[in-house]
Image: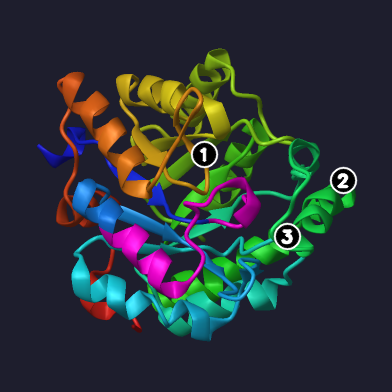
Amino acid sequence: MAANKVIITCAVTGSIHTPTMSDHLPITPDEIAEGAIGAAEAGASVLHLHARNPADGSPTPDPEVFMAFLPRIKQATNAVVNITTGGGHHMTLDQRLAAPLRASPEMCSLNMGSMNFGLFPAADKFTNWKHDWEPKYLESTRDFIFKNTFLDIERVLTELGEGHGTRFEFECYDVGHLYTLAHFLDRGLVKPPLFVQFIFGVLGGIGPDPENLTHMKNIADKLFGDAYRFSVLGAGRHQMSLITMGAILGGSVRVGLEDSLYLGKGQMAKSNAEQVTRIREIVENLSLEVATPDETRELLALKGGDRVGF
């Protein structure tokens, strides 16, 4: 039955890593499209997408850049397209919503709380930068709050959820974010089945300890019962171990070069597809089955790829 299957999400490029950190990070629309299509062919049923300025790799909210790769991905794969509403650091909510409102996707990410989001330690690991913006961008997070107020969340739920029939990957970086989601569930602004992404290892959020994963699941079970499915995101070197644990506990998994640039210890991932292939092998070796895109649509009650705006 589809209910027991593992959904593999692949976050293709994100807005956290910078071009100097890996030559394999997708930057241009062509690279993002190729990375997403490769991930889908490897077994990812959800593709989580950000856009970057093709000239220097900096995060961009420009809908025109999104539209340079979204139709190509849709044409080449049946995977669910999930567009960020988090965008990149220092983007306004108007900017973060511009591409999703244009594209009207089946799914978007939605961060469930304001938080410190520290990338600045990464600035100490490199000296020869490809672009001047990179160290400044990372260092700026020392004094930055990733803003997702109750009003912000209400706006996204109303404009995208009610206005476009888009459903959400609720990104929870800490236990309090689960209670915020429960608040919106109680108010009827979100409706089951919920797809909750537990995120571990971001500086400012909950740590990547196995005990924290079991704690997040226990609290979510208490708050949501059988009205939700969870997925696990482990940042950086914690990716494969934590998401494997998540699969064992009955959850889904998220990989991708947004979350980690590595395939294993000391081994850079050359593509998103490599990470998808690795976790798919692990999941199948655990005698679990991977959900297809259409099974994922059924599990998450999505509107269908024929009702998007690209």
> Residue extending furthest top?
211
- Verify whether residue 33 appears in magenta: yes
Q: Amino acid at mark 1?
A: Ser
2 or 1: mark nearer the eye = 1
Image quadrant where residue 241 sits: top left
Under circle 2, the secondary element is helix
Instruction: Residue under label 3, please give it.
Output: 89
Label 2 – label 1 distance at C-alpha: 21 Å
Q: CA distance from mark 2 to mark 3?
A: 12 Å
| Percent of width and height locating residue 9 | 36, 47
Q: Locate residue 188, reporting x and y percent.
A: 49, 58
Q: Position of residue 267 (x, y in %)?
A: 46, 30
The type of residue carrying mark 3 is His
The residue indicated by pointer 1 is 260
User: Which image quarter is the N terminus in?
Assistant: top left
On screen, 142 above or below 68? above
Image vertical order of residue 177 relative to residue 14, above or below = above
**What residue is rendered at 27% in x and 61% in y?**
37
Please count the marks in the image.
3
Residue ID for mark 2: 142
Under circle 3, the secondary element is loop
Q: Residue at x 19, y 43 (%)?
A: 291
In the image, which residues are magenta? 14-37
Residue 2 in magenta? no
